[in-house]
């Protein structure tokens, strides 16, 4: 158990350091802009490229795995959305943000570092695949549902589709994944100096991302804590990973590290991007921030517990092993 704690607690400790620093030191939120730029556009893309470029190409086309993990995330969104519809008497924009709160995990900031530390570098390919396709789902779902609810920008469906396409294919993480895959296909090796720079950036990615996440949570407005918040936290931290675990086990016989990576990423707390999307549409903003905070605090226990189940062998790598 001490080994599990030594893997998980430093990640949450970095979030806590960022949170405490933001509360103690009165620095404007705008001061976080350059760190966020470094994380999103430089450090994390370097990490994705560095690891994917050394990955065997045949591992990058596991469509059954992609389908199962993506379906699990979509089902979690649908359940959380329906809970939101019930709680808000059919308010589609609010329910959409609540659906995202129950399905959009912190797979960008927490996912790569935690999965690689806990499961080894073999986790990088499933992390990258889940990241790309889950983000594609969320990037498409938000404007589509907001348009249905009448809270989206007044523009043609074609322009909305173009905006979604642009957000997906210009995202730095997805671009880095594409370039990393191409490097793996072409067996491209960067020059020694460039390779060393990529290593430095990769090592900085997780600590900076987690610290910045803590600062963001601390500086974001906090709303009340309605009953629906407890429901959404339960969906995100319990229902979502269970759905992914069952579906990935059912669809195919994948390597244990792939199954565990999918479950671990599904068990992560609500992404700060949910708060950003809520701000973009001016819907459920303060409560979205509260959701990020509460789910992150609760996940200290749930994610650590999941890592213990994995490390101790109490969680089978396949619920439906082939005979």
Image: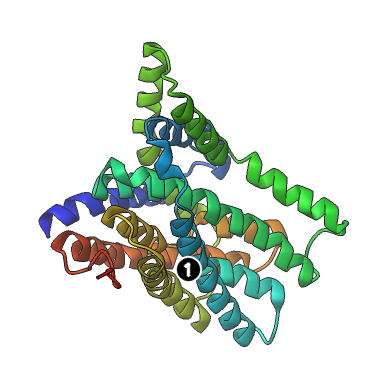
Q: Position of residue 104 (x, y in %)?
A: 51, 61
> Would residue 243 appear left or right of 37 to someone viewing this image?
left
Q: Position of residue 3 (x, y in %)?
A: 13, 53
In what quadrant of the picture does the C terminus appear?
Answer: bottom left
- Nearest the viewer among 319 and 194 is 319
- Nearest the viewer among 233 and 34 is 233
Could you tell me if residue 42 is visible in this image? Answer: no
Could you tell me if residue 106 is visible in this image? Answer: yes
- Nearest the viewer among 160 and 245 is 245
Q: Position of residue 74 (x, y in %)?
A: 55, 68
Instruction: Name the residue: 52% across, 34% down.
Output: 176
Instruction: Name the residue: 36% across, 68% down.
Output: 245
Q: Residue furthest left?
A: 2
Q: Position of residue 7 (x, y in %)?
A: 21, 50
> Would residue 139 appear left or right of 41 to someone viewing this image?
right
Residue designated by label 1: 72
Instruction: Name the residue: 47% across, 80% down.
Output: 231
Number of numbered labels in the structure image: 1
Secondary structure under badge 1? helix
> Would residue 135 appear left or right of 296 to someone viewing this image?
right
Residue neighbourhood size for the residue with mark 1, other residues' Cα within 10 Å, grouped as few (<14), some (14–19), many (≥20): many
Identify the image quadrant of residue 106: bottom left
Q: Is residue 29 above or below residue 155?
A: above
In what quadrant of the picture does the N terminus appear?
Answer: bottom left
């Amino acid at each position: 158990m001490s080994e599990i704690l030594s893997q998980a607690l430093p990640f949450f400790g970095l979030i806590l350091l960022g949170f405490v620093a933001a509360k103690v030191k009165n620095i404007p939120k705008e001061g976080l802009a350059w760190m966020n730029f470094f994380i999103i556009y430089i450090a994390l893309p370097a990490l994705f490229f560095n690891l994917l470029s050394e990955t065997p190409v045949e591992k990058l086309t596991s469509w059954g795995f992609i389908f199962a993990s993506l379906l699990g995330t979509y089902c979690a969104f649908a359940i959380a959305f329906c809970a939101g519809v019930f709680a808000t008497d059919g308010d589609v924009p609010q329910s959409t943000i609540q659906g995202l709160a129950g399905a959009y995990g912190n797979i960008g900031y927490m996912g790569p570092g935690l999965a690689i530390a806990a499961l080894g570098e073999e986790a990088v390919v499933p992390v990258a695949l889940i990241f790309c396709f889950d983000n594609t789902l969320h990037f498409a779902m938000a404007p589509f549902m907001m348009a249905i609810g009448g809270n989206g920008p007044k523009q043609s469906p074609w322009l909305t589709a173009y905006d979604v396409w642009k957000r997906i294919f210009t995202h730095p993480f997805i671009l880095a994944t594409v370039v990393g895959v191409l490097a793996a296909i072409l067996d491209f090796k960067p020059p020694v100096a460039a390779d060393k720079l990529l290593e430095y950036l990769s090592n900085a990615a997780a600590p900076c991302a987690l610290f910045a996440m803590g600062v963001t949570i601390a500086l974001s407005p906090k709303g009340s804590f309605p009953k629906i918040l407890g429901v959404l936290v339960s969906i995100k931290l319990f229902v979502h990973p269970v759905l992914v675990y069952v579906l990935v086990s059912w669809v195919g016989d994948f390597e244990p590290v792939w199954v565990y990576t999918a479950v671990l990423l599904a068990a992560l707390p609500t992404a700060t991007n949910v708060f950003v999307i809520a701000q973009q549409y001016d819907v459920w903003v303060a409560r979205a921030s509260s959701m990020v905070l509460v789910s992150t605090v609760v996940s200290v226990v749930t994610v650590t517990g999941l890592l213990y189940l994995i490390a101790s062998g109490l969680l089978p790598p396949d619920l439906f092993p082939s005979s």
